[in-house]
Image: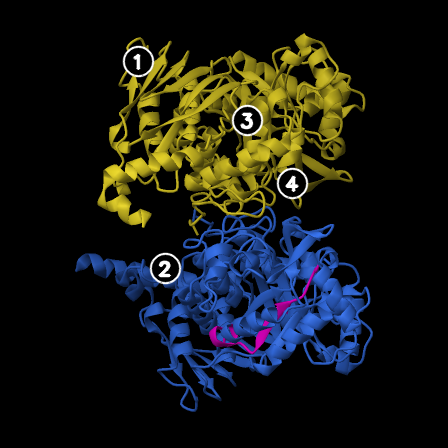
Chain colours: A blue, B yellow
Amino acid sequence: MSRSGSHSHRVRWWCLIVAVVAVWVQQVEGVWPLPQQLHQSADRDCLSPQRFSFTYGRDSAAQTGCSVLDAAFKRYFSIIFPDFTTLSENVLQYMWSEPQPFVVSVSVKTRGCDGYPDEDSDESYTLSVSEGQAVLRSVSVWGALRGLESLSQLVYQDDYGTYFINKTEIVDFPRFAFRGLLLDTSRHYLPLYAILKTLDAMAYSKLNVFHWHIVDDPSFPYQSRTFPDLSNKGAFHPFTHIYTQSDVIRVIEHARMRGIRVVPEFDSPGHTQSWGKGQPGLLTPCYKGSVPSGSFGPVDPTVDTTYKFMASLLKEVKFVFPDSYVHLGGDEVSFACWQSNPNVRKFMEKMGFGKDFTKLESFYMESIMNMTAALNKTSIVWQDVFDYHERPRSKYVVEVWKQGCYLCKMRRVTKAGLKVILAAPFYLDLPIPTHSWARYYNVRPLAFRGTDEQKKLVIGGEVAMWGEYVDATNLSPRLWPRACAAAERLWSNEEKTLNADLAFPRLKEFRCELLRRGIQAEPLFVGHCRHEYDGL
Amino acid sequence: NLCLLFFQSPVRSCLLLVVVSVCVQQVHGVWPLPQQLHQSADRGCLSPQRFSFTYGRDSAAQTGCSVLDAAFKRYFSIIFPDFTKGSGLLMCENQSNRLSVKTGGCDGYPDEDSDESYNLSVSEGQAVLRSVTVWGALRGLESFSQLVYQDDYGSYFINKTEIVDFPRFAFRGLLLDTSRHYLPLHAILKTLDAMAYSKFNVFHWHIVDDPSFPYQSRTFPDLSNKGAFHPFTHIYTQSDVMRVIEHARMRGIRVVPEFDSPGHTQSWGKGQPGLLTPCYKGGVPSGSFGPVDPTIDTTYKFMESLLKEVKFVFPDSYVHLGGDEVSFACWQSNPNVRKFMEKMGFGKDFTKLESFYMESIMNMTAALNRTSIVWQDVFDYHERIPQDTVLEIWKGEKYQAELSRMTQAGHRVLLSAPWYINHISYGQDWRNSYAVQPQNFSGTEEQKKLVIGGEVAMWGEYVDATNLTPRLWPRACAAAERLWSNEEKTLNADLAFPRLEEFRCELLRRGIQAEPLFVGHCKHEYDGL
């Protein structure tokens, strides 16, 4: 009894000190990516985990039972107070003679807690932090998730471990609706856990599309229910190196909970070597002289069975992946094998394509884009498809990936009236030194000559982590914090975020926060974080 | 079908396995490649239950030998990682591995003269490993562990093998920089594990530098109190250092500390006022500081005490004294330094001042019975330095010419310049490390012998525990093979590629977060996320 009495005495005295110190330790912490409008005052409130709560506003369309937000409350509580459980209640009780409650009230205009985020999802939110409370308002639950993320970044600890939040007003919305990240699970298999962890980190940077480049030449890890032989024979290993249907569902649900769309890519007609193993007859047999050489080229676009197969596969994809977009690939098709094959040449003649194999590819791509449209899905294709045929007969989304003058390409694509996604300057698998994160930061996606209408067709951008030299061993440090630079470019007001030097201290701090959250984010430069990575 | 047979009748499954084995025949490599390796297609199967290590009767080391007892334990788990899950259905012969060491020395430390050679002979039911020292025995155990492999059914096999092996260079180092970023103890220990797998034998601990001073000195505790990133969490205590040294010793790895001066010492100044040169602007001190002040006695007294402590804490006979990249601008600005220059007759040549300082601390080091290593700058400035000083080449251009000059002057040399693997580029840059030929410079045979080895450097500007391991491994393995193996037999990187790919998978299996070389997969992927 007497011991605890003296303790409380000492602690009260100590709290006074904190109040005095606070005047000059005053930290106003940033939010990454930078909100559209952010006003912070030096006034701050200290937060006690015991008296901190999330509630739904009275006027909120979503209430307890809303799967997405209930889970987010739980998640963000631990993110905001990571050492909550390790602090003894006694200490906390004596920290403030009267711990003040702090209530985060979340109000959502429309429901949709069980839906999926989509291209039209409204991610805007307003956040107002004042004494003892924060009010978060958004149109959709997805906007509320973005607001919770910002809120979590506003909370900080001083040197004594006390949690604080400054009075803050935020009005925020994304600059681009499509802020993607591509993972390549074909060149190397990524264990499920690596994908889920990446989704966590994406949400911290407000990236909202996981572009799953799930299959390619080297392996076919997607376990198809319609064509099980594709992974049985085309995966690196038919049991350990595959994504089962339940794995895929887990990825989609984990992403949904974080307001992230999952756009699968089934790239064809090139990049399909692994498909051929489990689907005989799909690929074009290459010829040497007048006999088959034994090797295979792209998908054979001249036979009906190909289109029947693709129709069934796409039907399954529609069934498994709820997103309204499907990526159909269409890049880097080598024509040498088609050219060698007498049946293909005959088909070219019959169709009047002459010697122009780009027409053959366009013919194929158009067919599968029509299938996709018939399934009520929007096709994304790599820019090659547009390059070969600049007068599109149907609407599709073009992804610009070729280095060089990517802005010229954006201009042409938007001039043709097509939506466009920019990936070219965001190829993160190229391991340029970390300090050149500014290279991604300095990208200006709209800096091409064109009308406002054209600019509106730029729906966003995407960081790409191709897998030639990347697997679970180096994925995270190569992604983070470099992808954050692109994330801010895609979310924030460009005018306010032009200066990489100004961004540097904020990004440095955000990287430390990623470490604290268990993301293996590599350093930007010499220095240290309070919580170093210890996941070794 | 096969699976059923396997579980229902161990005897029949064994028959099946034997039949299968004819076509599954794998002969596995050893990385780095042994000097002589003869393998036959005959193989024996190993059962964890019937596998043992013993000391040969004629061995100078017997049970109780700390280094080898620990190595037996370690390698048993490495060889049989899923031992506890093993069903033991296969009927394998006893495999007893006898190990004979000529000299004792189980409680000593590896040093520059340690004999790391060994002979390994694997035949039916037994393997015989012979070495002069326990350090050689460790190398042999590592090779042995790489010879064991599992087939698709999980059974362990080893082929009949004869190995005669010894290192090409005595000094095969790896540098970690714990000043630009702090590396948690665990990251260092894990690196030592991986070093042993590639037969690296020197951990060059670039422990302090400008950004921070994490070494907690017993003589000068303020150095880390004020110079570390954080005085409690971002330091190496004496017990941390002892753990590193002991962990390294158990793996036959030397720990060579570097206390780099007179440049690269900004963090030293925080805890040791008066040590660094005050820079001047106009006629007044600017408030900033330059290199160590080489003009005053207190500096030398401080360095002497520090080096005495270093000798006491680090058992290795080498100490790295740095001496690189000293900027002369601050010295030049300081009137006391200019006066000293005049008095000493150095004129305007500040390289003479640096040489004066380095010579003083090299003499101190010699008086403590330690061999100094210094960066090439010291030699470049002052060609006549104590003969037994080891020089380390770090500058990228024209390192062959530098090798020539240094060895001509009779110095022992370490090559690091082509192995700065903190630099990364797209693609398979391990091939660049592999192509290095450390003795390909103009000089006599005697000169070539003065190249005592080389060192992989992982500087810390952009590296901490988050990306250390995938950036080190398997890229450092390329240099490891260059430094251990016969160059004639390992010139072709294309031939090395499949071996290295396999070795990288083995590193993953051992829990080392080694990044991929190219498209592909491993049976055991990294799951340490």
Along the viewing direction, whichever of B282 and B22 lies nearer the viewer: B22
* Residues at marks 4 and 1, CA–CA distance in whole angstroms: 46 Å
* Residues at marks 1 and 2, CA–CA distance in whole angstroms: 54 Å
Tell me if A239 is positioned left or right of A484 in this view.
left
The residue pinned by badge 4 equals B423
Name the residue furthest left. Answer: A1
Q: Amino acid at mark 1?
A: Gly
Secondary structure at numbered mark 4:
loop
Along the viewing direction, whichever of B146 and A460 lies nearer the viewer: B146
Along the viewing direction, whichever of A214 and A207 lies nearer the viewer: A214
The residue pinned by badge 2 equals A83
Dot in front, 4 or 1? 1
Numbered mark located on residue B192 in the image:
none
Dot in front, 3 or 2? 3
Q: Chain of mark 3?
A: B
Res. A277 visible in picture: yes
Res. A509 visible in picture: no
Q: Amino acid at mark 4?
A: His
Numbered mark located on residue B173 in the image:
3
Residue B488 position within the rendered picture, expressed as x and y whole percent measured from the top left: 63, 20
Q: Chain of mark 2?
A: A
Question: In the rendered structure, which segment of residues is drawn in magenta?
Answer: A317-333
Residue at 28% x, 66% y is A93
The residue pinned by badge 1 equals B56
Question: Few, some or many C-alpha atoms within 10 Å of disc 3 (few <14, some 14-19, many ≥20)?
Answer: many
Residue at 75% x, 58% y is A339
Residue A62 position within the rendered picture, expressed as x and y whole percent measured from the top left: 42, 86
Residue A176 position within the rendered picture, expressed as x and y whole percent measured from the top left: 64, 75
Q: Amino acid at mark 2?
A: Asp
